[in-house]
Image (cartoon, grey):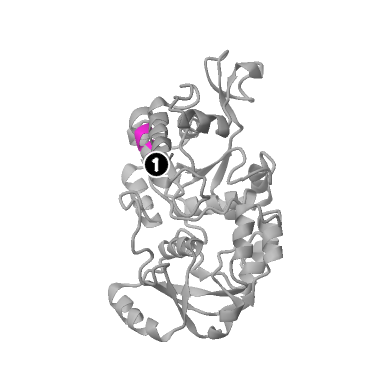
Amino acid sequence: MSLIEPHGGKLVNRIVEADKGKALLAEARAFPTIKLSEREQCDLEMIAIGAFSPLTGFVTEEEFYTICNDIKLPNGLPWSVPITCVVKSADADKFHVGGKATLLDDQGKVLAILNITSKYSRNKDLEAQNVYKTMDKAHPGVAMVYDEGDVCLGGPIDVICANYEPDFTEYRLTPAQTRAMFEEKGWQTIVAFQTRNPIHRAHEYITKVALETCDGLLIHPLVGKTKSDDIPADVRMKCYDVLMKNYYQPSRVALSVMPSAMRYAGPREAILHAIIRKNYGCSHFIVGRDHAGVGSYYGTYDAQKIFDQIDQKLLKIVPMKFEHSFYCKACGGMATAKTCGHDKSNYVFLSGTKVREMLCAGQLPPAEFSRPEVAQILIESYRHAH
C-alpha cells in the first residue's frame, strides 16, 4: 500500500530551476507588472509547491464558471473555490491573451511570470453567492471579493521565487516533503487537522480519536492571511509545539504549516482544505463543527454535509466528521452528543468572548477547556498585545 495519489494524479511543481529563473528574471522587465495582494501571494505559493494540484496557475474563465457553478474543474475533478489573479479595469488593457505578466510581491520583488491564456470579467455576484453563500459584504471573504479588481487573468505560472521572506521555515514543508516524511515514518494512512486557532481540549480530543484509526496525525495550521482579530500565527505555533511535546505520542504526530490564505467560505472551503491535504499525502481529513465558518452564515454541520455532494471516487480523501465535543463532569472526560447522555449543565463550555476576557485578565481557563501550558502562552500574548 502506498500514499494517496495527489489530486489529479500528479504533484505540480511550478518553481523553475535556477538557470531558467535567471533568464526569466531578465525577461520580466519587459512585461507589464501586477502587484499581488496578500491573498494572491499565498495562492501563488500554494500553486508553486503543488498544494493546489492539479492547478498549474490561476484559473481561466472556463474553470472559474465550472468551479462556481458545479464545484468542479472542466475535466470533472472536484474543486470548490476559484483561485484568481485580478487587476483593476483601468489597468486591464495592459494585458492580453497570449502575452505575459510579471507578478510582484508587496515590496515590488519579482515572484513569477504569468502566461496569460484567459482574460475575463470577474462575476463577483456569482462568486459571492455560490462560493460564500452570501453577498453580504460584512462577510470577510465576500468583502475580499468585492474589494479586489474586476478583471481576471488566467493561465500557468513560472515561479522564480514563491516567497522572499517565508515564516516558519523549519515547518514550511512542501507536499513533496511531507510525503517523503510520511514514507520515512512508515505511515500509510494519515489524518490531517486544519486549524487557524490554538488547539483546546475539544480539538485535542477529536484529533486523538481520529489518530486511533490512522497511522499518523498531521497538525497542519493555516499561516497565510487571516482576519485581523484571529490569533497571530507565531503565537499559535508556540501553542502547537508545547501541546505536541506534552500531550501527544511523538512518534505518531507531525507539525507542518500551510501557507494558504483563509477565505472563511465554510462548506466550499472545507472541500478545498481536504483537496489540499490530499496533495500533502493525507488519506483522511477531520471536518469539525462549522469548519472554515465565520459569523452565522453557515449551518453548524453544513461543512460536513457538502461532502455528500462530491463524488468520493474522485475526491478519494476520507472526511472524518466529528460532532461538537466538550468535557462532561458527569462522564469525567471528553465526550460528544453521540457518547454522552448527561444534562448540559455538566458540560464545561466557554464562549470565545469569555475565554478572551479571562486571558486578558491573566486568568487560566478551566483545565477541562484548555491545557494550562497553552493558556499561559495565550495569556502572555494578550498581555503583550494590550
Give amino acid for label 1: Val
Vertical placement of residue 146 versus 261, above or below:
below
**Which residue occupies the extreme front position in the image?**
386
Where residue 146 appears, x then y in whole percent? 64, 64
Q: Quadrant of residue 95?
A: bottom right
Where residue 352 appears, x then y in whole percent? 56, 34
Depth check: give the residue in front, 103 or 310: 103
Taking the magenta stretch, the answer to whether it contains residue 57 is no
- Asked if residue 341 can be seen in this view, the reply is no
- Asked if residue 349 can be seen in this view, the reply is yes
Magenta part, dominant SS: helix
Look at the numbered disc 1 and give the secondary structure of its residue. helix
Depth check: give the residue in front, 62 or 161: 161
Residue 88 located left or right of residue 109: right
Residue 271 located left or right of residue 198: right
Instruction: State how many labels appear.
Output: 1
In the image, which residues are magenta? 239-243
**Which residue occupies the extreme left position in the image?**
19
Vertical placement of residue 143 versus 243, above or below:
below
Q: Residues within 10 Å of mark 1 (few under 14, many from 20)?
A: some
Depth check: give the residue in front, 190 or 29: 29
At a point 33% along the width and 34% down the height, the residue shown is: 250
**Which residue occupies the extreme top position in the image?**
330
Vertical placement of residue 170 versus 126, above or below:
above
Q: Which residue, given by chain and number where applicable, does mark 1 sit on?
A: 235
Taking the magenta stretch, the answer to whether it contains residue 240 is yes
In the rendered image, which quarter contains the C terminus? top left
Where residue 56 appears, x then y in whole percent? 48, 69
Depth check: give the residue in front, 229 or 21: 229
